[in-house]
Amino acid sequence: IIILILTFLEIAKRKPFTEESLEVKILRKLRNQAGFPNMIDSGFIQGHEFVIMRMLGPSLKDLQRKTKNKHFSFKTAIQIGIQCVSRL
């Protein structure tokens, strides 16, 4: 099953509504890189930019809710931080 996320990003008045946001430009450059979702489509609807991408797995919030005390352990928090930094 392909799970899609539809995210609406407000378009700032600083740019015309037809210009891609920085997020979309970055997602295009990171296409097919480990740890980053593949962008399926993007565009504009009524002054809002949309992005459709594949989910990589459950959200961190969902994983956190499944823990015994609803918090990540120190070790898990460090591992998440390391993964985030390694993607830079």
Image: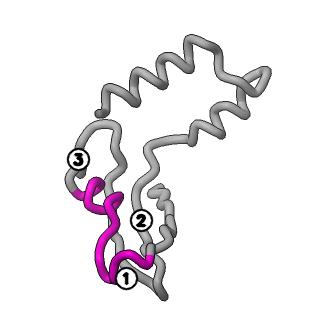
Can you say whether 64 is above or below 19 in the image?
A: above
Q: Position of residue 7 (x, y in %)?
A: 50, 65
The disc, 1 or 3, on the residue closer to the chain's N-terminal end is 1
Give the answer, above or below, for where 34 lies relative to 41: above
Which mark, by number, is residue 32? 3
Relative to residue 4, is residue 16 drawn left or right?
left
Position of residue 22 measured from the top left corner of the image (x, y, whole percent): 32, 60
Residue 70: name its quadrant. Answer: top right
The residue carrying pointer 2 sits among few (fewer than 14), some (14 to 19) or many (20 or more) residues within 10 Å by Cα, namely: some
Label 1 crowd (10 A; few <14 / some 14-19 / many >=20): some
| Mark 1 vs 2: CB contact within 8 A | no
Residue visible at 56% across and 11% down in the picture: 75
Q: Is residue 24 magenta?
A: yes
Residue matched to label 2: 52
The local secondary structure at tag 3 comes to: loop
Q: Which residue is mark 1?
A: 17
Q: Tag 1's secondary structure?
A: loop
Q: CA distance from mark 1 to mark 3?
A: 27 Å
**1 vs 3, front mark:** 1
Label 3: how many residues lie within 10 Å, few (<14), some (14-19) or many (20+)?
A: few
Amino acid under label 1? Phe
Residue numbers of the magenta segment? 13-28
Disc 1 to disc 3: CB gap under 8 Å: no
Q: Based on the displayed image, in which of its 4 quarters is residue 14 positioned?
A: bottom left
Query: Is 20 on the left or on the right of 83, as rendered?
Result: left
Q: Pick the residue in front: 77 or 12.
A: 12
